[in-house]
Image (cartoon, helix red, strand yellow):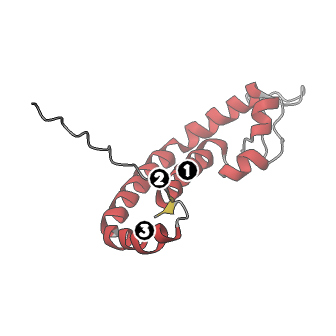
Amino acid sequence: MVRRRVKRKAPRRSRAVSALNVLESYMYANIMTQSFAGTSVLGLFTSGSDIRAPLASYGGDATFVNADSTVSLTEIISQPDLALQALSANAMANWKYAVGATMVTGISFRLGKKLLRRPISNINRNIMKPLGVGIKL
């Protein structure tokens, strides 16, 4: 009689949230909102609306007036055409910063995780896992 093969259980994947990955994602989001919206992630959602079309007597080439060069979610919803013009103006002015900061952030997190691999795993194994908080470094 042929022996049955015992099916091995698939290894369980950890459901813990990595605090370092959350921090890295927040830094990427902050770089993008600083570069394109001119404000932080929190400011994008909480700041008010001050973007407007120029006065009829204005003869310049600007198609919008934005005193502080920031764009908020309120402005994107209420006046999307003016907000997109402001976003594109900010993007053209700050794209080099966004590329550089994104590259530096990625390299520094990758290098930092490699250098601190042993202390991070020690903290996760000896502190976070026994506490069962669902967060790891």
- Is any part of residue 63 visible from this angle? no
Q: CA distance from mark 1 to mark 2?
A: 7 Å
x, y (%) of residue 6?
Answer: 22, 40
x, y (%) of residue 33?
Answer: 62, 46
Q: CA distance from mark 2 to mark 3?
A: 29 Å
Q: Write down the residue under mark 3.
A: 124
Above or below: residue 93 compared with residue 21: above
Q: Write down the residue under mark 2.
A: 101
Q: CA distance from mark 3 to mark 1?
A: 28 Å
Q: Mark 2, residues whose alpha carbon is within 10 Å: few (<14), some, or many (≥20)?
A: some
Circle 3 or circle 1, nearest the eye: 3
| Point 42% across, 68% down: residue | 124
Specify which label sits upstream in the sequence, 3 or 1: 1
Q: Secondary structure at mark 2?
A: helix
| Point 36% across, 56% down: residue | 107
In the rendered structure, find residue 60 and report the number of the disc placed on it.
none
x, y (%) of residue 85?
Answer: 69, 30
x, y (%) of residue 67?
Answer: 79, 45
Toward the viewer: 104 or 125?
Answer: 125
Specify which label sits upstream in the sequence, 2 or 3: 2
